[in-house]
Image: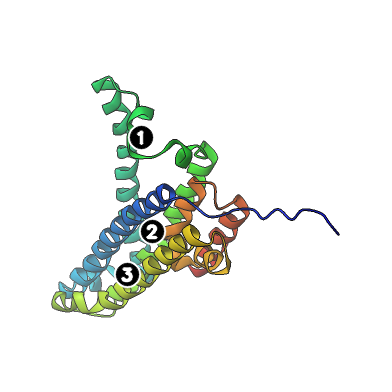
Amino acid sequence: QGNEIVEEDTSISMDDYWFIYGLLFVVMMVSIFSSSQIATSIVSDKSSRVVEYLLTSVKPMAILVGKILAMLCSVLLQIITLFVSSPSSSYITGKESNDILGQIISSDTIKNINPINVIVCLIVITLSFIFFAILAGLAGSTVSRIQEASDSLSIFTLITLVGVYLAIGAAGSMVESGINGFVYFALLFPISSAYILPGAILIGKANLLIALGAIVLQVIFI
């Protein structure tokens, strides 16, 4: 009707991409490390027959949940320590934490970071750790000897890599063409949302409605 059509540019810069990639890498490493510890612990208990004594008074799912919660508390404690030690280090050295972040990350990338986004990201990451920990625990429960632990984790590692590559592909797609159907799928799919959604929230490319949908799907999958 003669009105100007304004197309919104939803693409991201390379600084945003590397921010998402860096956060993705950290979440991946922590998830693999903690989940592998859970699977190895379960295999170790089975090989030493400790689990046989535990099963006389404790349900199998209770043992698995206990190991997951213990490792989750350990991981969260390390993350909290990181957040506490970073500003403390900046204060001791006489440098503002914002100046240090500014040297690593552009101001446009971190301008959307606020307490609500940080809390939502922590919820997403926590549920993701629980989800992958359950997968690793179930993988570890399929074998009874410590020598077979690596074989049991092969499927878990494959699932993790699928999620990582989906997230990297979606981040690359956001650089080229912005938000599209594939990006929405990666943001909502529990296997890949763990890696791309926190970064997308912090740079302002994923609203709270998408985060809520991803959280609901994570809970359903768990």
Q: Nearer the viewer, residue 163 or 44?
A: 163
Residue at image point 44% right, 58% down: 196
Q: Residue 211's spot in the image, x, y percent?
A: 56, 55
Nearer the observer, 69 or 159:
159
Q: Which numbered disc flags the more N-terminal residue, 3 or 2?
A: 2
- Mark in front: 1 vs 2: 1
Q: Which residue is mark 1?
A: 101
SS under mark 1:
helix
The residue indicated by pointer 3 is 136
Amino acid type, residue under disc 3 in the picture: Ala
Q: Position of residue 83 (x, y in %)?
A: 34, 37
Q: Is residue 104 above or below residue 163?
A: above
Packing grade of label 3 (10 A; few <14, some 14-19, many >=20) is many
Of 176 and 110, the residue lying toward us: 176
Q: Which residue is located at x 57 percent, y 65 percent? A: 180
Q: What secondary structure is found at the residue carrying circle 3?
A: helix
Percent of width and height locating residue 202: 48, 46
In the displayed structure image, the side of residue 95 where residue 201 appears, left or right: right
Question: Which residue is farthest front?
Answer: 2
Nearest-to-viewer mark from 3 and 1: 1
Find disc 2 in the rendering and name its residue: 129
